[in-house]
Amino acid sequence: MTEVETGTGTAKPRHAARISGVRGFARWPVEGSPKEEGKALRARVPRRAHAELVLDIDRPDAVTAVEESNRGRLPELTPIRVGRMAATPFAFLRGSAGLMAHDLARTPMTGIRAHICGDAHAANFGLYGDARGGLVIDLNDFDETVHGPWEWDLKRLAASLVLAGREAGADEDRCRQAAHDAVGAYRRTMRLLARLPVLDAWNAIADEELVSHTDAHDLLGTLERVSEKARANTSGRFAAKATEPVEGGGRRFVDAPPVLRRIPDAEAESVAAALEEYLTTLPEDRLPLLARYAVHDVAFRVVGTGSVGTRSYVVLLLDHRGEPLVLQVKEARPSALLPHLATSGHPVPEVEHEGRRVVQGQKRMQVVSDILLGWTTVDGRPYQVRQFRNRKGSVDPAALAADQIDDYARMTGALLARAHSHSADPRLISGYCGKNEELDEAAAAFAVAYADRTEADHAALVAAVRSGRIAGEMGV
C-alpha cells in the first residue's frame, strides 16, 4: 500500500478507511487482543463453574420430552424412534438434544458464540468421501446446527463419552478420563489454532496429522478397518442391494419394510420435481455433472435415532452406463436448540429455510463438505439434499475397547475445536480456556453428573414403554 499526504501531514495507507468499512473484514488497525478478552471472561465465568449441573423445576420429565420431540413426525414411525432411544442410555442421549439443551441453557456460559453442531455427541463424527476419492474424518450430522454457545457442543461431547464408555464396559475412572481428555484436546487444539497463521488454522488438522496430534495411536487399527469399510460404502453398492432391474431398462427400489418402502407415484413425482429447486442451490459448476444423470426412482427410507419419524427419501439417478448416484432428500425440522437459546440469553436467529440452515451450518464447520449439498422444498416442507452413502464410515464409541475410548475422546475433541474455529476466533476461546486443566476437570465432572441424569431419564423411558404409557418398538 502506498502512503499519501494528509491535511495534517500524517501519512496513512491510501485504502485504510475503505477497508475498515468493508463488510466481513476486521477494522484495521485491529484494536484490543482477543486472547486478553478471553482471559478477562474468567473473572465473570470461572472455568471451575462449568462443573455445575442444576436441574430446575420446569425441566420436563424424560417421557414428556420424548413425546414433545415426536410432534410433527410421522406417527407410524415414532414407536421405532422411541424403541431406539430406549435401547441404552447412550442411545437416549443421542435422541434427546432438545432436553439437554434445556439443561445446558441453565449452566454457566461465557457469551462467546460459534456456529455449533448442536448435537456433537461421540457418534456424530465419522468418515466420508471428498471430491477426489479420499476420506475425511469430521463432524457429520448437522440437523440441530445453530449459532450458539460453544460450551454446549463441548459438554454434550463429554457427557456422551462417559455414557459410551460405560456401555463399552470401561470402568468409571476411564469414562471420566475420556471426558477430561476430550476437553483437554479441545483446549490444546484451540490454543494451537490461535498461534497459527489464519489460513493455516482454517485448513488445519489434516487426516494424516490427526492421530499424532491427539496421541490416538491405539485407534489406528480401528480407523483402518472403518476406512476400508467406508471405501466400499457407495451409491453403487447400496443400489445393487436395494434396487432391481425393470423391463425396458433402468432400475427401481425394492420394498424392505420398515426401513425402505416404495411410495405412491404422486409422492415420488413431488420429490423428483423438487430437485429443480435443489439445482438452484448448488454452485453452477456442479450442474453439468448432474445433467448427465436421469432420475429413475424415489423411495422412502427411515433414518437414524434422532431423525426417525422425519420424512426422508432416496432418489435413484443413473448415468448413460447405468451407474448409480443416490441422493438423500431429508426433511429439515427446526433445530431442537432454538427454544433454549432465548433462555440462555443468546440471540435467536431468523431462519429462512431449515434445509439451508443445515447445509450452511455444515459448510461452516467442516473443512471439506459433500460437493452436492443443497436444499429444496417438497409439498411446502423444507428438506436438505446430499449424497447418500458417500463412502461413509463411523466408529461406534460404545463398541471400542476400554483402552481406546480416551484416544477417541482426544480425536473428537480436536475435531470439535477445529470446527468451532471457523466461526469463533480461536484466540478468544483459547484465551478463556487457558493452559491448565481447570476447564478439563470441571467439564469432566459435569459430564459424569449428566451421564447419571441421562441413565435415570433412560430408565424412566424404558418403564414408560413397558407400562404402555408410550409406544416403542425395540430392536428395529
Image (cartoon, rainbow, N blue to C red):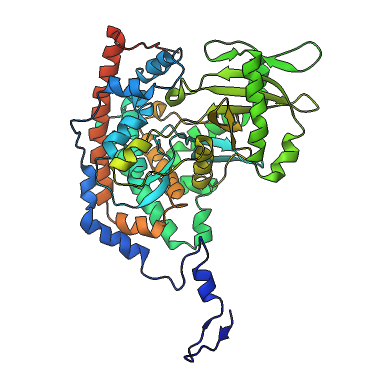
Q: Is residue 442 left or right of residue 236?
A: left
Image spot of residue 46 (x, y percent) = 22, 53
- Numbered disc total: 0
Image point (19%, 33%), residue name: 56
Q: Position of residue 450 (x, y in %)?
A: 25, 33
Q: Is residue 95 left or right of residue 23?
A: left
In-front residue for pair 113/139: 113
Displayed quadrant of residue 363: top right
The answer to whether residue 385 is above or below residue 13 is above
Location of residue 197 in the rendering, given as x and y in whole percent from the top left corner: 49, 63
The structure residue drawn at horizontal position 38% and vertical position 28%, both measured from the top left corner, is: 94
Q: Nearer the viewer, residue 138 or 372?
A: 372
Quadrant where the C terminus is found in the figure = top left
On-image quarter of the N terminus:
bottom right
Can residue 391 be seen from the camera position used here? no
287 and 192: which is toward the camera: 287
What is the residue that sits farthest to the front in this orientation? 380
Residue 130 appears in the rendering: yes
Q: Position of residue 469 (x, y in %)?
A: 29, 10
The residue that appears at 69% across and 15% down in the rendered structure is 252
Q: Tell me what residue is drawn at x 37 percent, y 50 percent.
A: 113
Q: Is residue 211 left or right of residue 386?
A: left
